[in-house]
Structure formats: structure tokens, C-alpha cells
Image (cartoon, rainbow, N blue to C red):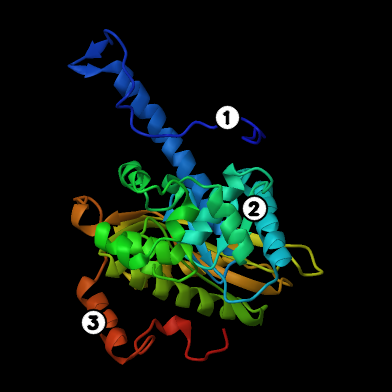
Amino acid sequence: MPTLKNRQRVGLGDFSGVRRQQPMRQNGCSLTRLFLAGILSQLYELYHSLSTKMMDTISQFADDIYVYSIDELFARFDTRLSHDSWLDLGRDIRRTVWKEVRLPVGAGGGTTPTLAKAASHAAKRISGYNGVAVIDSEQERINILKQMDVTDVWGIGNRLGRKLNLLGIHTAHQLSVQSPARMRKQFSILVENTVRELNGEIRIKWDDVRPDKQQIYSTRTFGARVTDKRDLHKALVGHCESAMGKLRRQKSLTKAITVFASNSPHDDTAYYRKSIYHPFPVPTMDTRIVTKALPAIIDKIFKPGVCFYRCGVGIVEIIPAANYQADLFSINEDKPALMNVLDAVNDRYGKSTLQVVSKGFDKKT
């Protein structure tokens, strides 16, 4: 299998900078552009497939993940580990992604999203970190920030960077020692929050990272290992409910889901992990339609004898509901009014006040 390791990678983007003299044309349309569009379409499909597999793989390690873009995510951990243990976890994630997806990735950890991004920068760009960096001490924080240009800080663009340079602020560390109130007065509350985050104060909430998510994952470890297919089904229905609720809150539809389950890579038995991608004929926002697809998916995932440790559901192809053009020949079975009632009741009276029956009513999983 061909790999990308130790090779140049080409970033995909629009072709506004690509020019060709006297292109051939047919009916007023550039054949060169048509050719590039066809190649791009196939490349994006491949890129999306790799992205989904990568997110899927990383999600098995985290308590919660938040997909930031097609090639980047935030992972939140509820556990406390030593510095060396965090580094080992980062290396384990990199090895697993390389083994299962054949993509080289970097891992950066910090006590705030901005410090995590700084650590990610260090992992990739600063000598000695070799793909993994963790900012969990004052010494490590200062060391990394002193080696970063101010424009390397998350949220500080070139234009803002030039203004900061005029004030003698050239590095991330110099920005971090500024008065937050002064930065707010001279620039904005966003710069103030950046300064506070660089000093370990959480100012960016999970949903502030990206208002409209491109992918939505719900994943969690089991309180007790699961060996029964019905229990696995109940847990996955719960994840569907959670993910689809978030999808509706941002007024979107999904064209496909990915479902996975695994035991722990640290078990004495052989590691088992299975992921299934399931497209829908019509984009949907209806929890019932998604959960209806689960039994057939679980039949492909479940393996007798495996003690499942984690499972999850990913909403992986999201489109804005307002921009969707319905197909006259496809039947849309969504019930928006019913979903509105479901969300309104659960928002008012608490999560799972109304739920899909197949989820069950016990708290075992």
C-alpha cells in the first residue's frame, strides 16, 4: 500500500492561483477547469474518507472529541496523568492512526484550547518534540511560547500580528505577559481571551471553537465492559440521540454516519475495532431515521467474545438545512415538528425525558 510518510504532501484548495494560457474550451467552458474539477471531486472524496477514519480512530482514546476541521480535532480528557503519561498517550495516538489510516499526525496537549494549539505547533514545528508536545507546567509553557512567533498563536493573523509588532510584541510569550485589560482596550475581547488562555485560564468554551461543526461525534467508554449485542445497541442509540440533537441545534442535515465499537488497546486479548460508514439516500435531521439504521450496522460490528470498552457515532457529512434542495424523486421521511417537540421537552425537563424506546430505560451503559 502506498503511503504518505516522509513524502511531500500537497494541500488542497481552490485553484484561483492556477492559470494556463489559451485553454481549450467547449461550449464556453474550460476543459482544463472541467478536468481539474473532476480530479478535485475524487480527491475530496478520498480526503473526506481519510478524515473520517482518522477522527474515528482518535475518538477511541478520548472522553470527548470536537471536530474543528476536516483535518484537526480537539479531544477532552477527564483524567489526570503525569507529563510522561501524556506524552505516551500522544505517541500511542500517533502510532494507532498511522497503523490504521496510514496518515502521519501530530499531537499537542494543554490546559486550554489555545495552549493545546500552541503545543500542536511545537509538536510539528519546533525541534526536539518529534510530533508530540504537552504544555502542563510553567517551564514548558514559557519554553514553547518563547519559540513561537506571535502570528503562530491561534487567532492572531498577519494583520493583527503587524499591529502587535509595532508595540514590541513579536513572540507568543511576549503576548502572554501583556495586561489582558490593555489588550481588550487596544484590540478586542478576543485578544484579551487569547492572552488569558495563554496563561492557562480557560476562556474558550467547547462550542466557541466552531459554531457550525463539519462533523459531530458522540463517543464514550462504558462503565462496565459490554458483551451483549442488545446493550451495545442501547448505547449506540443514546449516542445517536446526542449527536442528532446537536445537529438540529445548528440547523443542519446529515448525509451519512459512521458507527464504531472497540475493546481497549490495553486489554490482554487481541485488539478489536470495527467501524461502519452508512450513507442515507436523503439528508436527514430525524433521530428515528438514524436509529433505524443501527441494527444492520451493529450486525456488522458486533463480535461474540469481545469485551467492548468504547463505542460511538459520528455525523460525518453535514450540510446546512437552509441550503438543501430536495429531490423530487426521493421520499423525505423526516418529521421536523416531532423533532422540535422532542428537543423542546428535553431542553425544558432534562435530557432523555423523551427518548427513542430502543435506547432502554436503565443506566447500565
Say how many tags the image has. Answer: 3
Label 2 secondary element: strand
Q: Point out residue 261 in the picture as x, y percentages from the top left corner.
A: 60, 66
Amino acid type of disc 2? Answer: Val
Amino acid type of disc 3? Answer: Val
Would residue 67 be visible to someone looking at this image? no
Please name the residue that numbered disc 2 is placed on. 132
Q: Point out residue 23 in the picture as x, y percentages from the top left corner.
A: 28, 11
- Residue at 25 percent across and 83 percent down: it is 344
Would residue 87 be visible to someone looking at this image? yes
Q: Point out residue 313 in the picture as x, y percentages from the top left corner.
A: 49, 66
Label 1 secondary element: loop
Front position in the image: 265 or 205: 205
Please name the residue that numbered disc 3 is placed on. 341
Label 3 secondary element: helix
Label 1, residues with CA under 10 Å away: few <14, some 14-19, many ≥20: few
Front position in the image: 73 or 100: 73
C-alpha span from label 3 to label 2: 46 Å
- Residue at 48 percent across and 87 percent down: it is 360
Which comes before the other along the chain, label 3 or label 2?
Answer: 2
Q: Point out residue 149 in the picture as x, y percentages from the top left corner.
A: 47, 45
- Residue at 41 percent across and 74 percent down: it is 242
Which comes before the other along the chain, label 1 or label 2?
Answer: 1
C-alpha span from label 1 to label 3: 51 Å
Please name the residue that numbered disc 1 is placed on. 8
